[in-house]
Amino acid sequence: MAILVTGGAGYIGSHTVAELLDVSEEVVIIDNLSKGHKKAVLGGKFYEGDIRDDDFLDKVFKENDIEAVIHFAAFSLVGESVQDPLKYYNNNVVLTLKLLTKMKDCGVKKLVFSSTAATYGEPENIPILETDRTLPTNPYGETKLAVEKALKWADKAYGIKYISLRYFNAAGAHISGKIGEDHNPESHLIPIVLQAALGKRSEVSIFGEDYDTPDGSCIRDYIHVTDLAQAHILALEKLRNNDESCIYNLGNGQGFSVKEVISIAREVTGVNIKAVTSERRPGDPAVLVASSEKIRKELNWQPKYGELHKIIETAWNWHKNNPDGFGD
Ligand code: UFG
């Protein structure tokens, strides 16, 4: 039976497809390529199309014997979600409800869902536990939380079991150097810093130096994309063991400030990357650090690339060799 990966040509999706192929899973990928890259898909059976297209979804579910779904397809830019919330509700909520309905109709009862640290909003405690308050401060986080709530009820009513993974800051690139991060436009810190190292940007802006943190810049918990991908394999195993639905944080449990990231990137690249201070970015919490104790304990998840130095090294390897990303 096959694992259906939606958004499998995207950054985290493509790295998860790579891990699934490594453990010889049969993989079916759907992606409308609005953000993803065909070249990022290293194998499996690829369908280009949109979940909103009924005929397309019917075809994929008819032509394949789908055991479980790993659902990445979504928009994920916090700022954009504030500008255009309905775009986010339409894509992230409506589209997921369509997929869930299809799963229900076809008797597919296992789902791994891409969720986010943005479900918490301003944290109550650091590190953040899965049981902490969820009060998103932007529509992106709201849409992911809305889906998590729908999943709870879909489990009760139809027996669709799910694992929701709340990602903190995904970063880095595949160790093989074959795939990496390529967003257009890029808004994430590490690729921006590395583009500056490559001379593709003149400088990096530090969004705010007046936060209540030791050096005044925001602190985040960076997690290697392959370690994130591995967690999806473990989640799939848990679902195969007929375990209960649940939610896990995914981070390394260690925070780094924007200035620390830039300084490590200078060491890794050997380039004196220019950084300038600019205004705070609206909606940015000062500190986001995960407790991932639950997934470590329950699924024995162990990050392989936990060091930020290593994470940035893999990203640099990708950006250096692919300065124009996938070039599409
Ligand atoms: N930053 C800068 N300069 C830049 C880009 C980012 O200083 O040019 C800062 C941001 O203000 C933030 C940190 O670097 O403090 C990390 O920013 P990213 O944009 O790389 O990542 P975010 O923490 O904003 O976003 C991540 C995920 C989102 C998710 C969010 C949850 O990418 O999908 O965490 O809060 F919603």
Image: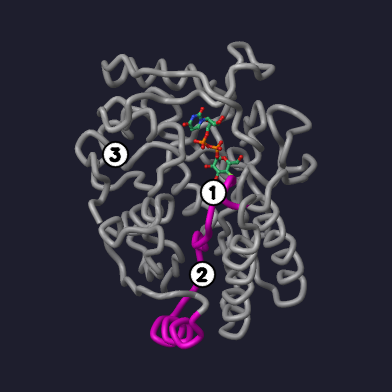
Amino acid bearing label 3: Ile
Is disc 2 placed on a helix, strand or loop? strand
Tag 2: residue type? Ala
Q: Amino acid at mark 1?
A: Leu
Q: Residue at x 71, y 77 (%)?
A: 158
In the drawing, does residue 292 fall left or right of residue 60?
Answer: right
Name the quadrant containing residue 171.
top left
Q: Which residue is mark 1?
A: 77
Query: Residues in magenta?
Result: 53-81
Q: Position of residue 72 (x, y in %)?
A: 50, 59
Q: Quick check: is the Cβ at mark 1 less than 8 Å away from ligand 1?
A: yes
In the picture shown, does residue 58 fall above or below 312? below
Quadrant of picture, ligand 1: top right
Q: Is residue 43 visible?
A: yes
User: Where's residue 231, x and y in %?
Assistant: 50, 48
Residue that carries the numbered disc 3 in the rendered image: 175
Q: Quadrant of residue 306?
A: top left
Residue 149 on the magenta span: no
Which one is in front, 273 or 322?
273
